[in-house]
Image (spheres, helix red, strand yellow):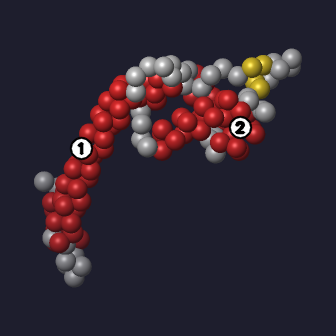
Amino acid sequence: MKIGELSKRSGCSIQTIRFYERKGLLSKPKRTQANYRSYDKTLLDELIFIKQCRSLDISMKEIETLIHNKNNPEQSCSSVNKLIDEHICQVNKKIKELSSLKLTLEQMAQSCDANKTIKECGILNELSH
């Protein structure tokens, strides 16, 4: 299949597919006699794997590691578990940061009275300090 069909089947843009190729996350496609890239089911599966990882906010470096592990099926799964455990820690840290941000925004929202003027706006005053 050509890149347009791969794009449709995977839900990834052509630019994203080419980006993954340049980064080495997606295997190099075969070339036709006319020198067009030719993608097969294996490359579609690779692309879907990468897309799934990205949907979980897994970094490119982590995806590279997971692909390496996937291509060495006899290895222990412990490195994959470790990577995911580290990712969970990162997610927990982000949740904590976002919770703190939400609390700050809620406090700011309470400092604003809709009946006041912009000059008296508690939110704008807090942001100015």
Residue 68 visible in the picture: no
Is 122 rendered above or below residue 34? below
Q: Residue at x 16, y 66 (%)?
A: 107
Above-or-below relation of 6 to 109: above
The amino acid type, in three-letter code, at marker 2 is: Leu
Q: Is residue 53 left or right of residue 96?
A: right
- Number of marks drawn: 2
* Quadrant of the image occupied by residue 115: bottom left
* Residue that numbered label 2 is attached to: 6
Q: Earlier in the sequence, mark 2 or mark 1?
A: 2
Q: Residue furthest right?
A: 33
Residue sitting at x 62%, y 22%? 27
The N terminus: image quadrant: top right
**Horizontal relation, residue 48 to residue 79: left or right:** right
Name the image quarter holding residue 99. bottom left
**Numbered badge on residue 93:** 1
